[in-house]
Image (cartoon, rainbow, N blue to C red):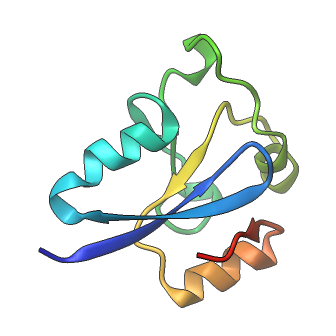
Amino acid sequence: MAQETGIILNRDGFAIGVTYNEKESLATLQAAVGGRIESISQHFGMDAYANEEGLYTPGLQVNPHAAHVLGYNIIGNIVLPRITPTKRKRLIAKGFAIKPE
């Protein structure tokens, strides 16, 4: 089974890599955001997901770094699946600091 690489954009402004099998992709994406996923792709120009019920999930807070980059609030982590080297460069250009893997 093919391995996929994704990136979780945490509230601290850093991005952390995550590797998963295609079969595990939904569970991995949901675990990364702490619940059901909702697409926010139009804001990144690539696949991106946040917690669908972030406003109603106890313990989740505004992701200030995402708010700075996007111009509006996102609650909790953002996860981007299937990251390529080109997409990684685009994220860095948007201001996300990516921790070395």
Above or below residue 19? Residue 100 is: below
Residue 71 visible: no
Q: Residue furthest left?
A: 1
Residue at image point 61% right, 80% down: 88
Residue at image point 77% right, 66% down: 96
Foreground of the two, 76 or 39 = 76
Q: Is residue 69 left or right of residue 3?
A: right
- How many discs mark residues in the rendered view? 0
Above or below residue 96? Residue 2 is: below
Q: Is residue 25 left or right of residue 40?
A: left
Q: Position of residue 19 (x, y in %)?
A: 38, 66
Residue 55 visible: yes
Q: Position of residue 52 (x, y in %)?
A: 47, 28
Q: Residue furthest bottom?
A: 86
Q: Position of residue 25 (x, y in %)?
A: 27, 54
Q: Residue furthest front?
A: 101
Above or below residue 84? Residue 27 is: above
Q: Is residue 31 left or right of residue 66?
A: left
Residue at image point 52% right, 68% down: 46
Q: Residue furthest right?
A: 68
Quarter of the picture containing the C terminus is: bottom right
Above or below residue 28? Residue 4 is: below
Residue at image point 74% right, 59% down: 14
Q: Position of residue 84 (x, y in %)?
A: 48, 84
